[in-house]
C-alpha cells in the first residue's frame, strides 16, 4: 500500500512537472500576430511615410514581447484592399486585427466578422477620443473598431483676396448667408474686359450644403434625398452657380489667386505642395483655414472621415491584438508620430492640443495662423461623420450624378421626387 502511494505521489509530481514544462515551452514559442493594412494614405493623397510609423510600432511591440512576431502583407493598394480582406474572411484566414475598408464597416460589424470591444474599453479610454472619432467605430451602439486617424473637412480662405476687397476673414460660427454675400461681393470682372475673372468659391459640393442645413442622406425610413434640407441645399447651390454665370470654377483658379474659398480636407491641406497638390509653393497669396459655414449656430458643419482598426472575432491572440490596437490609437507618442508622418488629425484630444502639434502645423509653411491646433481642436469637437458614408459607393455615385444633372438643368424641386423614386427602385 505504501509503494502504491509512493508511485501515485511520484506520478503526480511527474505530471505536474510535465505540465509546467509544457506551459513554459508554450510560452517560449513564437506567437504570430497578423495585421491587415493597405499601402499608403487613407485619404488618397501622396504619402510614402505612413507605413514607416507602423513598422516603428511593430519594432517597439516586438521588443516588448520577444516571443511575438507581428507580420503584415505589404504593398496592397487601397483600391484592392477591400477585395483582399473579403477573400481572407471567406477563407477564414482574416488577420487578427486589420484596417477597416472605408465603406465596409457596417457590413463587417453586422455579419459578426468584428469582435465587440466594449468589455475591453475603459471609460477613461473612451473619453480620451474625440466623440466623432470614437463613434465612427460603433455599430448599433456597440464599439467594434478603434479610431486611428481622422480627416476633417475645412474651408480654406484666400486672405489676400478678401483683404483687397475690404472683407474681414469670417470667424468660427459664420453662416451660409455670410458665405453667399462674400461670394457675391468678390465675384467680378477685375480688368474691365467684361469677363468675370474673380470668383467666390470652387469645389463646394451639394453634400457640404446639405450638411450645412443639418441634413443627411438617410433617415429612419432609409435613404431620403427628397428632404426639406436637400431642397434648401440645392437651391443654395443654384444661387452660388448663378454668381459665376455657370462657369465651372476650378482649383487651378484658386491656385492662381482668383478664388476666395476652397473646401479642403486636412489631408489635402497638409499635402498641398507636393504633386499633384503642387502649386502652393508658386502662389503669391496667403491663406488660412476656418470651419465650414452652416445655416445656423446649432448645426455641426465639419464632416470627418476616420480610419479604423478592428479585431477579428476569430482571433486566437485577443490579448496581443488588443494591446497593439491600444498602441495605435491610445498611445500619445504613437499618435504624435502618426500626425508628424501622415496627413490626418490625431484622434486623441490631448495630442491635437499639444505644443508639438502646433509646431508641426506651423512648419507646414502656410503661415503661422493658417491652421492652429486650437482651431483644429474646435473643428473636431463640433463635427459629424462624413454623410457620404451613410450609403454605399454605388448609390452615392448614382445620387451624385442625378443631383448634378438637376442643378445643371435648374430643375431641383421637380427632379428630387423623381430621383427619390429612382434610388428606391434601385
Image (spheres, helix red, strand yellow):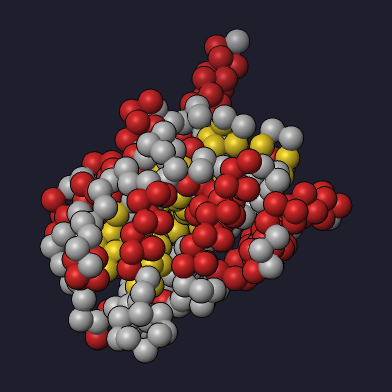
User: Which residue of the protein is positioned furthest toward the top in this rendering?
Assistant: 1
- Residue 200, quarter of picture: bottom left
Residue plotted at (57% across, 29% down): 141
- Residue 2, quarter of picture: top right
- Along the viewing direction, whichever of 169 and 309 lies nearer the viewer: 169
Image quarter in which the C terminus is found: bottom right
- Residue 134, quarter of picture: top left
Residue 307 lies, in percent from the top left, at 47, 54
Residue plotted at (50% across, 27% down): 119
- Along the viewing direction, whichever of 114 and 260 lies nearer the viewer: 260
- Along the viewing direction, whichever of 190 and 296 lies nearer the viewer: 190
Image quarter in which the N terminus is found: top right
Residue 59 lies, in percent from the top left, at 33, 61
User: Which residue of the protein is positioned furthest toward the bottom in this rendering?
Assistant: 193
Residue 221 lies, in percent from the top left, at 74, 35
Residue plotted at (46% across, 34% down): 20
User: Quick check: 29 above or below 156?
Assistant: above
> How many numbered circles are shown?
0
User: Which residue of the protein is positioned furthest toward the right in this rendering?
Assistant: 425
Asked whether residue 320 appears in the rendered view, the answer is no
Residue 372 lies, in percent from the top left, at 20, 54
Residue plotted at (60% across, 36% down): 139
Q: Answer left or right for 205 relative to 106.
A: left
Asked whether residue 358 appears in the rendered view, the answer is yes
User: Quick check: 405 above or below 284?
Assistant: above
User: Quick check: 138 above or below 30?
Assistant: above
Amino acid at each position: 500500500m505504501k509503494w502504491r502511494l509512493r508511485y501515485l505521489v511520484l506520478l503526480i509530481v511527474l505530471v505536474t512537472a510535465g505540465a509546467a514544462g509544457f506551459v513554459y515551452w508554450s510560452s517560449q514559442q513564437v506567437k504570430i500576430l497578423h495585421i491587415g493594412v493597405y499601402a499608403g494614405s487613407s485619404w488618397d493623397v501622396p504619402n510614402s511615410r505612413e507605413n514607416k510609423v507602423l513598422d516603428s510600432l511593430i519594432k517597439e511591440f516586438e521588443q516588448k514581447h520577444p516571443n511575438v512576431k507581428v507580420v503584415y502583407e505589404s504593398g496592397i493598394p487601397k483600391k484592392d484592399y477591400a477585395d483582399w480582406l473579403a477573400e481572407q474572411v471567406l477563407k477564414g484566414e482574416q488577420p487578427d486585427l486589420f484596417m477597416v475598408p472605408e465603406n465596409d464597416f457596417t457590413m463587417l460589424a453586422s455579419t459578426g466578422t468584428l469582435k465587440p470591444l466594449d468589455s475591453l474599453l475603459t471609460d477613461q479610454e473612451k473619453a480620451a477620443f474625440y466623440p466623432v472619432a470614437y463613434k465612427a467605430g460603433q455599430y448599433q451602439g456597440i464599439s467594434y473598431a478603434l479610431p486611428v486617424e481622422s480627416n476633417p473637412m475645412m474651408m480654406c480662405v484666400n486672405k489676400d483676396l478678401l483683404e483687397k476687397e475690404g472683407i474681414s476673414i469670417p470667424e468660427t460660427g459664420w453662416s451660409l448667408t455670410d458665405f453667399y454675400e462674400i461670394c457675391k461681393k468678390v465675384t467680378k470682372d477685375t480688368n474691365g474686359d467684361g469677363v468675370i475673372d474673380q470668383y467666390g468659391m470652387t469645389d463646394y459640393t451639394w453634400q457640404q450644403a446639405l450638411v450645412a442645413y443639418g441634413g443627411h442622406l438617410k433617415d429612419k425610413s432609409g435613404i431620403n434625398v427628397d428632404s426639406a434640407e436637400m431642397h434648401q441645399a440645392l437651391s443654395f447651390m443654384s444661387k452660388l452657380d448663378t454668381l459665376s454665370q455657370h462657369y465651372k470654377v476650378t482649383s487651378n483658379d484658386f491656385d492662381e489667386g482668383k478664388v476666395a474659398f476652397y473646401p479642403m480636407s486636412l489631408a489635402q491641406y497638409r499635402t498641398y505642395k507636393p504633386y499633384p497638390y503642387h502649386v502652393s509653393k508658386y502662389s503669391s497669396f496667403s491663406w488660412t483655414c476656418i470651419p465650414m459655414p452652416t445655416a445656423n449656430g446649432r448645426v455641426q458643419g465639419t464632416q470627418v472621415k476616420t480610419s479604423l482598426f478592428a479585431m477579428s472575432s476569430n482571433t486566437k491572440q485577443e490579448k496581443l491584438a488588443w494591446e497593439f490596437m491600444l498602441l495605435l490609437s491610445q498611445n500619445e507618442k504613437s499618435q504624435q508620430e502618426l500626425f508628424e508622418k501622415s496627413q490626418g488629425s490625431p484622434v486623441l484630444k490631448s495630442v491635437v492640443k499639444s505644443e508639438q502639434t502646433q509646431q508641426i502645423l506651423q512648419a507646414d509653411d502656410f503661415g503661422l495662423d493658417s491652421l492652429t491646433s486650437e482651431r483644429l481642436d474646435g473643428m473636431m469637437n463640433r463635427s459629424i461623420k462624413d454623410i457620404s458614408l451613410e450609403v454605399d459607393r454605388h448609390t452615392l455615385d448614382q445620387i451624385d450624378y442625378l443631383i448634378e444633372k438637376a442643378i445643371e438643368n435648374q430643375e431641383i424641386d421637380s427632379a428630387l421626387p423623381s430621383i427619390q423614386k429612382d434610388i428606391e427602385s434601385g
